[in-house]
Amino acid sequence: MKRQEAFLKQWGLTMEHSIFLSFINALALQIPGLSRGPLGSANPIVKGMIPSAFGIMGISVGLNLLNAIIKRKMVDQEKLKRLLKETRAWQKERMAAFKSKDQAKTDELNKKSAYMNKMNMEVMQMNMRPMMFTFLPLILVFYFVLPPLFSYTVAISPISLNFIPGGFFELTCTAAKVADSQIAGHPDICHHVNELYFWAWYFLSSAAFSGIIMRITKTTMDTS
């Protein structure tokens, strides 16, 4: 039992990180929304929900495309795919040996753990390197360029998207926020329940198109 727990722990540390990196890549432009209240303007330059929704969608696609192009220029894609293919094959083989309880094969594969961990770290560094150059400029654009252009809310969802309890990571307006907006002296942010915040619509648009953009620019983590 202890041997199994130790193996699973090690597997967790060396598990393929393509999902994690894809998530980070998708969130690179969206993290600002996690750390502050609604972004936007009470008197935006772009008027109306439809122009705002399409405008933010276009900007999210453009910035994700720019991010992918920079990644393609800075990262050796062939080397990245070769490393990913090798580490994934090793991980798959080791997991198969563990499930079949082939201890001899597991021990043999575990001898390569240090080498594979080094390769995993190299892959991580290759994927994070472009973010060192793009993250700060995109944060500045998100905070200081986009908010004056758009209203606090730019779309309406048919259902609430506030799935995380405790009021953390709210994407849509709640009845309480609508009531607060109607109080004199309070910011006029929410007009209807389930209105999507400016940053939330950007979050969803960017996440929706990031996978497509990575495939078009051939910067996906898929090794096939």
Image (cartoon, rainbow, N blue to C red):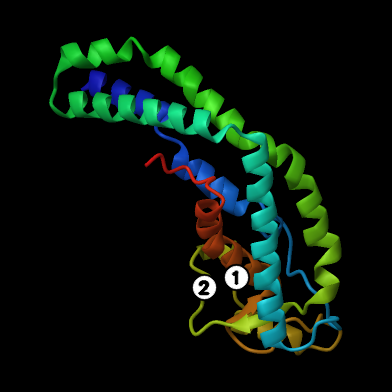
Residue 164, image x and y in percent?
Answer: 51, 63
Q: Residue at x 69, y 41 (%)?
A: 131
Q: Residue at x 52, y 64 (%)?
A: 208
Place residue 34 in its image quadrant: bottom right
Left or right of 120 on screen, residue 195: right
Q: Residue at x 60, y 62 (%)?
A: 206
Q: Residue at x 66, y 78 (%)?
A: 54
Q: Quadrant of the C terminus?
A: top left
| 195 up-or-down from 218: above or below | below
Question: Mark 1–mark 2 contact, CB under 8 Å?
Answer: yes
Of the pair 77 and 40, the residue shown nearer to us: 77
Residue 167 in sight here: no
| 185 up-or-down from 202: above or below | below
Q: Quadrant of the N terminus?
A: top left
Q: State the SS at label 1.
A: loop
Of the pair 13 and 75, the residue shown nearer to us: 75
Of the pair 171 and 139, the residue shown nearer to us: 139
Q: Residues within 10 Å of mark 1 (few under 14, many from 20)?
A: many
Place residue 29 in its image quadrant: bottom right
Name the amino acid, label 2.
Leu
Q: How many marks?
A: 2
Q: Residues within 10 Å of mark 2 (few under 14, many from 20)?
A: some
Q: Which mark is residue 190?
A: none
Q: Which residue position holds label 1?
A: 171
Residue 106, image x and y in percent?
Answer: 23, 16
Left or right of 120 on screen, residue 49: right
Name the amino acid, label 1.
Leu
Q: Which residue position holds label 2?
A: 161
